[in-house]
Amino acid sequence: MKVLIVDDASTVRMYHRNVLEAAGYVVDEAVNGLEALEKALENTFDLYIVDINMPKMDGYEFLMQLRSEDIDQAPAIMVSTEAAELDHTKAFTAGANLYMVKPIKPLQMMTYVRLLVGEESV
Amino acid sequence: MSPLLQQFVSETRDLLQSISEQLLEVEKADDKQTTLNELFRIVHTLKGNTGLFEFPDLTRVLHAGEDVMSEARERPEIWDQALTDLLFESMDYVSSFCDSLEENNGEPVSDSKAATQLSKDLRAYLDGNNSEANAEATDSGAANEPQKAKKAATKTKKATAQKKSAGGSSKRRPPRAKGLPPEHSLLKVLPVDTLIEAWTASSPDEPIWLVKYSPLAECFFQGDDPLHTARSTPGVLWGKVENACATQDINDLDPYQCVSTFTLLSNASEDELHEHYRYVTEQTDIEELSSHHLLLLSGDDQNDALPEDTVDALCDAVEAIQFDTASDIATTALELLNKDLQAAAALRWVIAITSDTDAQENEAKEALIVVCQRLRHNQHLSGYRFSEPEPDEKIEERKEEHEPEESRLDTYTESTTDLSGADTEDLLDALVEDDREAFEHIVRTQGRILELDPTVDWAKGRLRATCNVLIKTTASLGLSSLIPALEEAVNAALSGNTEPLADWINEVIPGACSAVGAGSESNSAEDESRNPDNLDTQQGPEDTDMEATDISEESGEENPDESSDESTADEAAEGSSEDTESQDTETTEQPEIQAPAATAPVETPAEKQTADKASSFKPEPAVAPSKSVKVDQEKIDRLMNLIGEMTVAKNALPFLAKRAEEQHGLRDLAREIKEQFAVVNRIAEEMQDSIMQIRMMPFSFISMRFPRLVRDISRRLNKDVQLVIEGEDTEADKNIIESLAEPLIHIVRNSLDHGIEAPDVRKQKGKPATGSLTIRASQEADRVMIEIQDDGKGIDPEVIRNKAFEKGLIDEATRQRLTDKEAVNLVLMPGFSTADEVSDLSGRGVGMDAVRSAVDKVNGTMALESQVDKGTRIRISLPMSIAVTRVMIIESDNQLMGIPMDQVLETVRVPRSDIHTVKHVKTTVLRDRIVPLKSLNELLALPAEQIINEEEEHAVLVARVGNDVIGLVVDDFRGSVDIIQKPMTGVLSGMQAYSGAALIGDGSVLMVLNLKEVL
């Protein structure tokens, strides 16, 4: 199972990577939407974890491209520090399947990731 | 410290640097918006990162910073220099927080008070400016008055504290002319009773004094009795004793040392206090406060403690000077309030002030206004800026939306019995609690996504993703009984009819998907029917048609709306945000969902552009993280040491070859060894080069601090300075670059403080009002040149001459003889400082000689040129690396010694007859220049005479030491060699004559002379 973390903050990427790798996922990273799009074109991922605010291409734009170009329709979680409802709607409209507010607790993240990638529970 | 924390610290530092660059940019930029957007993004990222850790103080400051940035992004006009200062201050806090994280291995020692203060200041800015908007937006009724006053207060806040002069005339000021005094962090912790008591005891016309007395540790031996001194302070209102080193273990405490500090509040006169503390003046800090500083709300922070109308009524009463009413309101409200809250403290202030019969009406009102302002501030800590009617509703709506969600979840699942999903409920119940919650949340969310506008380009992909999620999630939990129905529904959805899918979702989570197919799915249905390459079209074409007609009927009224929506997409987006969630009415929902979709193409390219632009400002942030590795310096140092040893080891090979040939007569072997040596030598040299390359750092590493430094200093001095930095990518060894930081800061300070004149002075001299300061780094051969040039008043050589003479640094003859240029360079001499008065910034008596010694330490040289009224130029020349030194090996009294090659000018053989004694000093004439000669044996107190060769010539090494040229008489020269110089350690470290030692090829130790000390 392969997960792409799209976030401009290296600390957040590392945090997510730590959690996911501990759970046995293969993790790749992208620092902005543009890089993520390139990676999505070359590889297949089982899940995208996407930040909103990023330079060059933000999370919304990335998701819209991901969905519209029919590049990948794998589940995507949008993560942000904003809890505002408006952002949720924007995220879902763009193509996110789940909206989570940072920081995500490791257990919570693992539960959701496991469900979203369709991995059988133990 | 965990790797994650390390990553956090290092990323934070990078982000702070970007913030600081952008902050400076904002002040200059014509296009503020772009920079503000970028700033917001960085601060936002930073805040997001802190959320991963438990650093409440840090998060508080950054959150406030983010809010301010968000506000500034919306309304760039609120930006001013004070805000920049405040943000810089906040970033300094973050930076010092990181320092403490690193120092204390992940356990930060945080200054909570500072954090609270900063976030308050930031938010005050927000509210203060916001009240401006409020005042404009609503009628400026009486209730708004305190807010306005507060706004004025925030702006003048800093100035007020010092303004009030001692003695205090009884001149009446109009109540609101005075601003809100800053909250003093020390006073902030006092209980409100103490504050009120102190306030009642003091008179508004007399200043009160905050005395901080920190006795010296050894004060007991000087006959001091700190406790008695503190207790007998005249006019004490309040006092406290603190342990200066609270963390110290009781067993480590030295009872003969004083570790206490005293903080006291006094209303005695300044003279009395100074008289009392006259023997310990340097241990006391007496700060002037006005009685208004006492008007603080201590207690717990809770921002919805008081209803807004109560606060308004209170303010109205105060404004109308109806103190009885105000007191009544406060008394009533106080009964209902938790006494520990800040709001309660405010009410008690109101009661205390209104009942203080001594106070003048005006003074009381002044005080009450301060209290009311603080109360408002406290009560509106968050959410206040939403006080315009619409957003307020939005917030409430949002709150409602959030809270019932979970309870709704429970009630619905419990009541599923009356729906067909009894089985489903059982299934879900069987799941682990976490899984069930997650599953429900995911499915509910997909239901929501299904309701969204299906007309967007990517709707098809989105739908497919949603289907994927539902299938995977369900499968993941092993809810196999749900799957057949789901698959059917998914197939229907993918071929254009989402209704079964919505039904399925509703069955699993009742009420999760309200938009049951029909209207919203219309377009995707059309879309799908146009697409022949669809998945198994289970639904017949009739179905699709039916759907389509359904829609046209239903959405007949919406269509005109829609078309106009597109032209005014932005407005629609705003409009829609008001009625955020409207699940029951399709009419409102349509534009709402439409809006973000329609705006998206309009908005995102713009965002993208700004982002692109913003990134082109920066020297390109570390975009590809995988390409660079952060390594502990120790590891590189170790590599460096190893390669040093390797160099030495390899140098043994030629000796080996020599021995093979001479002692064992193996010429062939000797040749082979030599060949092999050439190979090893090449590799070792390349290796050394590469390792050195790792240690190289760009000049920008230190120069990036200068913009901020120059800005801060020039603002403090009220000077206008344009800073230009060139050659930031010039590289040098890390140690060199780092050792350069302090001296450069010193030079820059000097330039700003003493060099560049105030704008009016400059104008008088016919120079542009804006001074210029240029810092230029460049590489010349194997040296790095740093040049600092200003166009200030320059250095007057006459002044320097006289000063040096007065200080006894030069004699009368030298004074006459020195050229202007030489005179100017006298400032580099130890103990020379030109500043007539010691200023806050520079001129602490350290002066340029400190700079020079720092430069000397890394084998650099510096020179100074200056012209009166034209400016000053300082040139510093540094080696690129100090890791490897090239030395000249010389022989003296049968010992080998090294002399750093960059000091060696030439080596000559001087016939004995050419050595003359002039004024007891041996000299020789070299190309028409007199060179003083010194015998090395003599300098090192070696008894032997210098050896002379057959031609009666002395070996003389001409060296430059500082700015002098001398000839060193030695026995013989032995060529030059690259060495890795090790500093003298242990018992040898006291030997000043040597700068270090190194191993040379034959395994022997070579001592490197420190010529400056030897001479």
Image (cartoon, coloured by chain):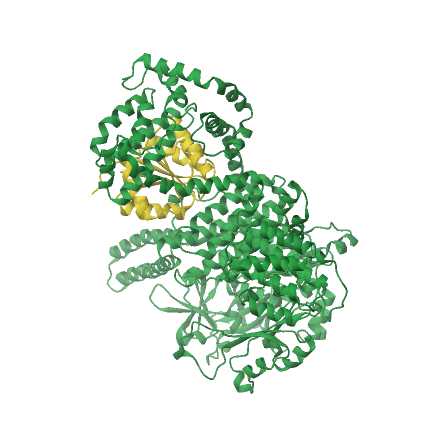
Q: Residue at x 47, y 55 (%)?
A: B58
Q: Please name the color used to draw chain B.
A: green
In the picture, the quarter occupied by the N terminus of chain A is top left
Image coords of residue B510 (percent x, y): 32, 33
Q: Quadrant of residue B524?
A: top left
Q: Is residue A5 visible?
A: yes
Image coords of residue B353 (percent x, y): 64, 64
Q: Residue at x 28, y 55 (%)?
A: B673
In the picture, the quarter occupied by the C terminus of chain A is top left
- How many numbered badges does the structure rendering display? 0
Viewer-proximal residue among B451 and B887: B451
Q: Is residue B751 visible?
A: no
Left or right, B954 with respect to B719, comes to left
Viewer-proximal residue among B157 and B588: B588
Viewer-proximal residue among B659 and B615: B615
Left or right, B298 with respect to B537, comes to right
Left or right, B801 with respect to B940, comes to right
Q: Quadrant of residue B334?
A: bottom right
Image coords of residue B411 (percent x, y): 33, 40
Look at the picture and state if B940 lies above or below B173.
below
Look at the picture and state if B205 lies above or below B714.
below
Q: Which chain is yellow?
A: A
Left or right, B889 with respect to B745, comes to left
Image coords of residue B656 (percent x, y): 28, 61
Viewer-proximal residue among B255 and B748: B255
Residue furthest out toward the right? B764
Look at the picture and state if B504 lies above or below B774.
above
